[in-house]
Image (tube, rainbow, N blue to C red):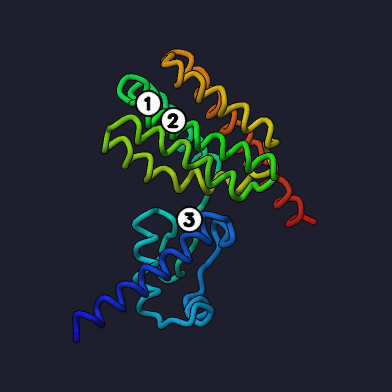
Amino acid sequence: MNSFNTVKQATLKQTVWRTLREAILRGELEPGKPLNQASIAAQLGVSRGPLREALGLLEEEGLVRSVPYRGTFVADFDDRIIAETYGLRLLLEQYAAERAIASSDDEEMAELRSIYEEMVEAANEADMEKYHTLDLAFHRHLYVMADHELLLQTWLNLEKNVKRGIYFGQFQLYSPAELTESHRKILEAIEARDVEMAKREIDFHITDGCKRLTEHWKAVQDRTHSSEKG
């Protein structure tokens, strides 16, 4: 009987964790926002126990931070985090592409194209929610094709910041045509098994995304400071 109670409690903790995690990644819980545990527990209809456990998991992921005597806050998302995330991503993804080109089979290559074609369809339908889910799937599959477990795990750890970037600004910073064109060039370079071309296209894709996202973050900061002064 106790084992069933344990499973139920663990499941509840995981449900709360997933709910809060998605809200943070999507920007619904904004960077730096204080998290009122009593209010959140009431909104989710849970006790404080599983909520505290879920917040502990989020803190381990770096998505929330606890400040003694002040409370728990959504982790910041700023220009330094953007630069570090995208700088590391560039190195990882170029290496992933090199390995994918050397070791992937035709079936894996076909799956990458299939994801891209779904992205084009989503863009044509202006379904950007679906598009960005597929965008992450496209890059994740590239790491799968690389056949390197530690590399894939590193990407999965980094992916949360990439997703925060998508919802923080990249939704608005690119047209659907720009997004599909950039991914088409990466795909075709990989299909041609051209390592140098793939690295160049990945460099442009990630560096340009970092630049636009950083500029957007600074513009948001300027607006915030101006409104506070006004």
The residue positioned 40% from the left and 24% from the top of the image is 97
Q: Which residue lies under the disc numbered 3?
A: 75
Q: Which one is in front, 40 or 195?
A: 195
Q: What secondary structure is marked by label 2?
A: helix
State if disc 1 and disc 2 touch (CB < 8 Å).
yes
The residue positioned 30% from the left and 78% from the top of the image is 8
Separation (CA) of disc 2 from disc 3? 38 Å
- Mark 1 closeness class: few <14, some 14–19, many ≥20 residues within 10 Å: few
User: Of the numbered discs in the image, which one, if any, rests on residue 110?
Assistant: 2
Badge nearest the viewer, 2 or 3: 2
Q: Where is residue 25 in the image (x, y as percent from the top left)?
A: 51, 54
Q: Which residue lies under the disc numbered 1?
A: 106
Left or right placement of residue 9 versus residue 189 in this view: left
**Location of residue 195 with respect to 4 vertically, above or below:** above
In primary-sequence order, the first of circles 2 and 3 is: 3
Q: What secondary structure is marked by label 3?
A: loop
State if disc 1 and disc 3 touch (CB < 8 Å).
no
Separation (CA) of disc 2 from disc 1? 6 Å
